[in-house]
Image (spheres, rainbow, N blue to C red):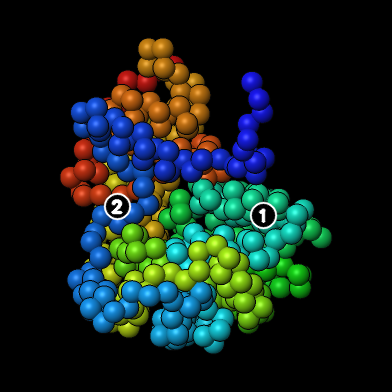
Amino acid sequence: MSASPLSRRVQAISESETLKMAKMARELKALGHDVINLSLGEPDFDTPVHIKDAAKAALDRGETKYTPVAGTLELRQAIVRKFKRDNNLDFEANQIVVSNGAKQSLWNVCQALLNPGDECIIFTPYWVSYSEMVKMADAVPIYVKAGIEQDFKVSAAQVEAAITPKTKMVLFSSPCNPTGSVFTKEELESIAAVIAPHDGIYVVSDEIYEIINFTGKHHSIGSIPALKDRVVTVNGFAKGYAMTGWRLGYIGAPKEIAAACEKIQGQVTSGANAFSQSAAVTALTADPEPSFAMRREFEKRKSLCISLLNVIPGIKTNNPTGAFYIFPDISNFFGARNGDFIIKNADDFCEYLILTVYVAVVPGSAFGAPNCFRISYAASEQQLTEAIGRIKAAVGKLHF
């Protein structure tokens, strides 16, 4: 057999585990099974009407042409005002780059900043694509881990211990996917204090879940003066405005980095679509109450899920304060079995759930945390109650 024609690059990266589990859920559902899919990070709410109406109006105005690579000036100016209003971040329009989703924004930044052999500190648990994006830039992911006993939040001391002469980037999300953890202002200040003395290190702060924050106040590490000129802030419209299919993300960055991201994007996708950008201006400038109502509903669901999970013996949960995920530790079940099915790790646990009770969740190994699994509570209270009831029943059949 001849060697694979595929590049070493594509052979070296992993398939997205969240997309893999969603695919398995769809296949089982197509076979007639009653599958409850809690694997995808997608709000189950529709995009607010005023945002959809803005897109329709843009179409009627003929906004169907190519856009500037970095985004329309109107949207970039709206993002500048949003950053100042909500995050105490000062940017100019030429420091903003709008992309086809925050995922592309992150990709652009990795390609713009990382050289072969550079190290990127990734707070772990991390979103599935961080490590693969770093690897595709021929850089080296350095995983700094925090378990459930730390609310999955790494400490400044851990970050300091991970810094080497090769460190080029620090990458994390807050609120966090997959854990729902949110860094406080004081925690971010401590982390900034250990990074600041190292002039060559840049911080990439993924704040896509900013609006879905139950603490009362979101804090951006880029607002800390010591790091002001070395932070790339990534955000978008998918989560807080239920605009996942609109594919719009953006960065605020030092001018040189923003220009590099624009250069990269110009050779890959060019600008994001026109009428989505017009609708995004409305999202940023109109009354945010629909987003706040969605956030209140997510917080109710979180409380429901925590109360249901806490009565299942062997499952350990903390109390996440943002996003729409719970990240239980299920290491107590490793070595347990049901018939011939043995739970050796979280991957086995998630496979056991989908094959026996048709609940799709994502194993923590995809996020660098093999003792855990991720539940997305972007589903109705009825579905969540049923799903966790099924998980309880499945766990009840395990024995050592």
Q: Is residue 235 in view from this perspective?
A: no
Residue neighbourhood size for the residue with mark 1, other residues' Cα within 10 Å, grouped as few (<14), some (14–19), many (≥20) = many
Amino acid carrying label 2: it is: Ala
Horizontally, is 396 left or right of 142 in the view?
A: left
Q: Residue at x 54, y 87 (%)?
A: 92
Question: Measured from the top left, where is residue 243 in percent x and y?
Answer: 32, 64
Horizontally, is 323 left or right of 50 in the view?
A: right
Q: Residue at x 76, y 73 (%)?
A: 199
State which quadrant residue 320 falls in.
Answer: bottom left
Q: Residue at x 51, y 74 (%)?
A: 69
User: Badge 1 is on which residue?
Assistant: 137
Question: Measured from the top left, where is residue 378 in percent x and y?
Answer: 29, 52
Question: Measured from the top left, where is residue 97 in percent x and y?
Answer: 52, 75
Amino acid carrying label 1: it is: Ala
Q: Earlier in the sequence, mark 1 or mark 2?
A: 1
Q: What is the residue that sits farthest to the top in this orientation?
A: 340
User: Badge 2 is on which residue?
Assistant: 378
Q: Is residue 232 above or below residue 111?
A: below
State which quadrant residue 238 falls in.
Answer: bottom left
Q: Is residue 299 above or below residue 342?
A: below
Q: Residue at x 40, y 28 (%)?
A: 351
Q: Label 1 vs label 2: CA separation?
A: 32 Å
Which labelled disc corresponds to residue 260? Answer: none
Q: Is residue 4 above or below residue 247?
A: above
Q: Which of 286 and 371 lies nearest the eye of the viewer?
A: 286
Q: Secondary structure at mark 1?
A: loop
